[in-house]
Image (tube, rainbow, N blue to C red):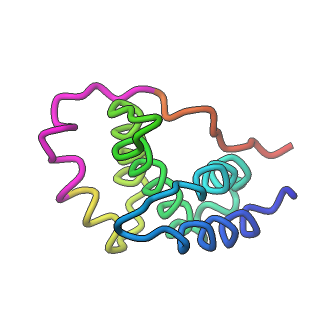
Amino acid sequence: PNISQGYLYRARAQAGMDTPEVKTWMAKPFYEEVTAKMKPEEQGRAKADLEEAYNYMGLYYLYSSTEMDRAKAKCWFMKVAELNAGTSITKQVNEVFLKMKELKDVVPAQCGAATVEQPK
């Protein structure tokens, strides 16, 4: 599928199976697809959806026991801040995650393999 919305709903379903005590991070590949498949012309009207994906990816790299990478986490959180969708996620990222001591002095890395497709 090339439609980001389908991946978004699958990501939400997978993320919904996690609990505060147990994080499986099974939504990661679907949120990656959201960031890769969302076309530039969709980004304006789907800022909150894109922000949700960026935030999840930031949390994944901040807290995942298998792929913890603070530089990538900071990159994703900075994307949330730059997108500035004006949601509670924006506020949380700006007031908490980008100011936490674990990320304060970290130089952001490239976010990862997920890139936005350019229109053809």
Quarter containing the C terminus: top right
Q: Residue at x 58, y 64 (%)?
A: 44
Q: Residue at x 67, y 56 (%)?
A: 30
Residue 41 at x, y = what percent? 70, 59
Specify the farthest residue to the front: 22
Please tell me whether residue 79 is drawn above or below residue 5 in the rendered image: above
Please tell me whether residue 87 is drawn above or below residue 36 in the rendered image: below
Q: Quadrant of residue 112?
A: top right
Residue 104 at x, y = what percent? 16, 36
Query: Could you tell whether 75 is left or right of 30 in the image?
Result: left
Q: Is residue 50 magenta?
A: no
Residue 117 at x, y = what percent? 74, 43
Q: Residue at x 42, y 67 (%)?
A: 85
Specify the farthest residue to the left: 101
Query: Could you tell whether 70 is left or right of 15 in the image?
Result: left
Q: Is residue 101 magenta?
A: yes
Magenta segment, which residues? 95-109
Please tell me whether residue 94 is drawn above or below residue 111 in the rendered image: below
Q: Quadrant of residue 16?
A: bottom right
Query: Could you tell whether 27 is left or right of 105 in the image?
Result: right
Q: Quadrant of residue 26?
A: bottom right
Task: Give the tally of numbered discs.
Answer: 0
Quarter containing the N terminus: bottom right
Please tell me whether residue 87 is drawn above or below residue 32 in the rendered image: below
Residue 19 at x, y = what percent? 42, 71
Q: Residue at x 43, y 56 (%)?
A: 55
